[in-house]
Amino acid sequence: MKYLAPVAVWLYMIATTVAEVVVFYSGPGTFSVDMAIGVIAMINSLIAALFFMNIRKEPPTIQYLMLAPLALVMVLILTMLFAFAQ
């Protein structure tokens, strides 16, 4: 196994975690900040699934099926944000 891809993904995860912290402290509690953190987290989970679970080597149909749970989690996050906003 080559070490370049896992190290690159690990560095990407660290960079996006730092980005999430910076976004949070730019304006905590606002809707746009919450959405940005949710999108960054969703992209992080997709990258982790593609590389660390070897889904990138699966057929494209299986890869697209991975997007469905991510979309459902985003709907859950949006629903919770709207519920707590009132």
Image: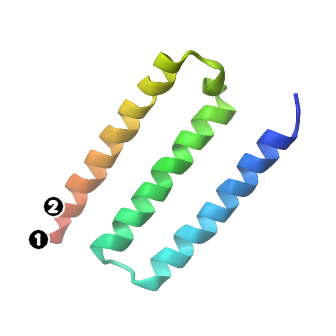
Tell whether 80 sits left or right of 47: left
Q: Amino acid at mark 2?
A: Ala
- Residue 86, which numbered label? 1
Instruction: Label 1, secondary structure: give it.
Output: loop
- x, y percentage for residue 85? 17, 70
Instruction: Report the Cα–Cα distance between label 1 and label 2.
Output: 6 Å
Is the C-beta separation of discs 1 and 2 under 8 Å?
yes
Question: How far from the left and from the top, in percent, is residue 63?
Answer: 51, 25
**Label 1: few (<14), some or many (≥20) within 10 Å?**
few
Q: How many marks?
A: 2
85, above or below 81, in the image? below
Q: Which residue is mark 2?
A: 83
Residue 29: x percent and y percent? 33, 77
Disc 2 crowd, CA 10 A, few/some/many (<14, 14-19, 20+): few
Q: Is residue 41 left or right of residue 1?
A: left
User: Which amino acid is tagged 1?
Assistant: Gln
